[in-house]
Amino acid sequence: MENDLELEDRILTMLSTQYEGIYQIDIDNDSVLCIYNRGNKFKKDSNVELEQWVQTMIDRCHYEDRGRLLDLISVEAVKGFGSNDEFNKKLDVRLMYDGKYKWILVTLMYDKTFNQITVTGRDVSHRYEYDEIIKRKNAELRKLLQTTEHLCQSQLLCIRLIFQKIQ
């Protein structure tokens, strides 16, 4: 039995490197079990009321993303989840971790058998960092292309003038 717990701890450690938070919402009891939370807003393996968990998540959320997150995890949304055959929802929002905002992919997965929702939060900030790099490089390329087009037009003008003088 001790080996089973050791394996479970190793699996949880491996998963925790990929996730900022893992929670289990018990819809029938309006409670949330914190399985893992990097930000230490909730104690591991402790239950909190659903409303308290929602409020804490909203408080950590960037003000521009709060409405969208609330639409996803509000008590009403959670209670209605799974009733219309939706079993998986995802949303990128900015949440505060370690004093700075990170882009977090919040995923809700409904378990019909136990009437529970597993919520995971995965750091996807790198996607947005890469997007900014790509935008910056595209702007540089556009500027370079414009410069090249101007040079090409200037060279064509010079060639025309030379050709006119020759004739």
Image: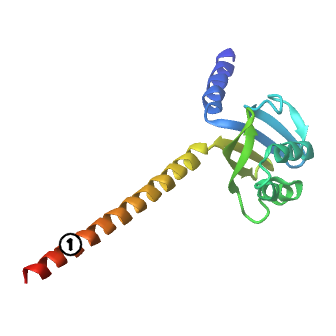
- The front one of 146 and 50 is 146
| Residue 145 percent across, percent down from the top left | 36, 63
Question: Residue 39 lies in what quarter of the image?
Answer: top right
Q: Is residue 54 left or right of residue 165?
A: right
**Is the residue 40 above or below the residue 56 in the image?**
above
Residue 63 or residue 161, whichever sits in front? 161
Of the pair 10 and 40, the residue shown nearer to us: 40
Indicate how the structure is coloured in the image.
rainbow
Q: Position of residue 137 (x, y in %)?
A: 45, 53
Quarter containing the N terminus:
top right
Of all residues shown, which one is farthest toward the bottom?
A: 167
Residue positioned most to the top: 2
**Quadrant including the C terminus:** bottom left
User: Hey, which residue is sitting farthest left in the picture?
Assistant: 167
**Residue 85 spot, x, y in % from top left:** 72, 63
| Residue underneath mark 1 | 158
Q: Residue at x 78, y 41 (%)?
A: 24
Inspect the image, locate mark 1, and give the three-letter code of the amino acid beneath it: Cys
